[in-house]
Image (cartoon, rainbow, N blue to C red):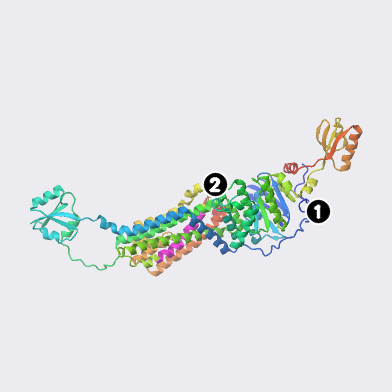
Amino acid sequence: MMTPSTETVQSTQNSPHVPNTGSGTATTRDTRGLRRTPFWQAVGVVSGREIRVRLASKAFIITTAIMLGGILLGSLVLPRLSDAFSSTETVAVTTASQSEVAALGDDVEAMPVDSAEAARAAVESGEASAAVVPSGDSPTGLTVIAERDVPTGLVQALSQSPAVELLDPNAPNPMLVYFIALGFGLVFFMAASLFGATIAQSVVEEKQTRIVEILLATVPARAILAGKVIGNSVIALGQVALFAAAALLGMQINEDTLPLDGLGMPILWFVLLFAVGFVMLAALYAAAASLVSRSEDIGSATSPVMMLVMLPYFAVIVFNNNPDILRVMSFIPFSAPVAVPLRVYLGEGALWEHLLSLGILLATTAVVLWLASRVYERSVLRTGKRISWKQALAG
Amino acid sequence: MISLRDVNRSFGDHRVLKDISFDIRPGRMTGFVGGNGAGKTTTMRIILGVLTPDSGSVEVDGAPITPGYRANIGYMPEERGLYPKMQILDQLVYLARLHGKTQKEATANAQGLLERLGLGERMKDPLEDLSLGNQQRAQIAAALVHDPVALILDEPFSGLDPVAVDTTVEVLRDVADSGAPVLFSSHQLDVVERLCDELVILADGQVHAQGTRQELLASATEPEWELHVDADTGWVRDTGVRVQAFDGGRVRFAASSPEQANQVLAEAQRRGTVHHFGQTSRTLHEIFKETIQ
């Protein structure tokens, strides 16, 4: 072993390749003015790529087209389905009960028979679904004969109701509230999980192909993360807007089949909160995905985030008629984008409550962005075994 | 000039780099060699700022390296990576734009480089459609597309055929001639020997030698001579030189000076016919093996 360790040899021997440049005296470029690409310019370039890649993806275009078609068709056809399924009922009547049944309107077709026995026979044979015959015992003077089930509609129609005075005839129909809640929940759930998965995929793709090392040598990790979140948010919002337009168009064609009065403000709140909430979830998805190195592991890594996305979706299905729980949900950042618009629609809560919800969501999003960029920065270069959140945060 | 000063880095309990110091001079191509796990990739990542050192510093012309300088280094990481489904021209334009080039500059640079590296016909092809050698060329283009002020390349020649190596060397040489420091690692010692102006040999996390090839040859080993005569050469042992190898009429020995070697030659001529006498030219390969042992 003759080599002296770490000996720096400094002589003036020239190498065969560069005969004219002695060591250290080559023409140097002026490197003092060098700067990084400005942060937001880098973010713009990254998000521009995300958008272009998404728009060039056949799968994305086809899915969007199919969903657009489905929504348009659904909004056109669904309200008319009830017409298609309602059928007229044939009711056997005797001369004594004919006038009473005829007064019930078009939904009931009176089939005159000779006697109460003939009416009974018509029901038994299935010619009529029910029969109405006079009866001395009943207070209405009529007996309804049916085969097995009580024909509720018919019985109700023939019953004598007390006078009803509605104090708030414009109060929201619970069924409508349910569907509106479901609509907000579904849009939020679909967009967040669909684009969350897309972001996760693109993070892992860069990690798996190792291009992220080149990117990180060029721009800060935060710029890459911000570019991904912004690019995908733009696409997600654009897609949701397109779907909303399709739904509104369908309703417009159907004219006033759905009472959409009073939905303007809730939709406005939804868009506002959705935009903020989506950024938060997108950052979480990106951070979760940066913990793994293979696309096979994305599912397990992002499942905790998936839970957070599903929370508002299931909560509104179960609790849309419970004002107290809705109120609590409106203050939880993950369910606020669905709960707040619903409360606005129901006329619950003061404006300051909604603003507070927005404030909580904004603050949480800021914290999540900070945490996510920390996790992303620390784990995106580590390949191999999956990294735990704790390891990533501890550094 | 990029300089590393007493750089240390550990991963857990494993000390990967131990007081690494060396210079990468502008306008020269510095070869970076060392066995597997010697710490080459970690060193390169620290220069790029992708990893931070536990202690020590990276300097440019005597001042701490700035993020601005780092962002203008052309980097080719050990593990190759570009987007598999993106057209190669598009990816290069994207990378150049990330470095702050305008769309126009980026496109012009990318097209020029791809033409030069022999990928002019494949610009519109997605990366995954290219052969491995061509993917490697695209990767080299990716390191050069933003007019870098310095190059740090991890194994730039692996997977290239000899013609592609030559084209690549030409391109790299142009960058070096513009005054940029160029550091590249390689396992192909013959390639390093042919290409680099200077060498840094890393072993077990330490710099074992650095300098030009001639300097290394001169300093790392005593010069050796080979002698081929008719008769047995056993007597050479008694002349005071160190015999390295010995086989009947052939002997290889190290002498402290040419004069001492000449004395051996004179003695050999006195004893019989000399078929061959000369200083052996040692290859980098031998030096490398000796150095890292």
Q: Mark 2 lies on which chain?
A: A
Residue picked out by circle 2: A385
B13 vs A275: above or below: above
Q: Does the magenta stretch include residue A335?
A: no
Q: Is residue B47 left or right of residue A67?
A: right
What x and y, as percent, mark residue B291? 74, 43
**Residues in magenta, as a range:** A268-288
* Same chain shared by disc 2 and disc 1: yes
The amino acid at mark 2 is Lys
In the image shown, does B111 or A37 lie closer to the viewer?
B111
Indicate the quadrant where residue A342 lies.
bottom left
Distance between the alpha carbons at the discs numbered 2 and 1: 49 Å
- Name the disc covering residue A12, or none: 1
- Marks 2, 1: nearer the viewer: 1
Q: Quadrant of the C terminus of chain A?
A: bottom right
The residue most toward the bottom is: A351
Identify the element where label 1 is drawn. loop
For label 1, count other residues whose C-alpha is less than 10 Å away and answer few (under 14), some (14-19) or many (20+): few
In the image shown, does B53 or A299 lie closer to the viewer?
A299
- Residue B238 visible: yes
The amino acid at mark 1 is Thr
The residue most toward the front is: B121
In the image shown, does B204 or A239 lie closer to the viewer?
A239
Q: Which chain carries label 1?
A: A
B264 vs A236: above or below: above
What x and y, as percent, mark residue A217? 61, 56
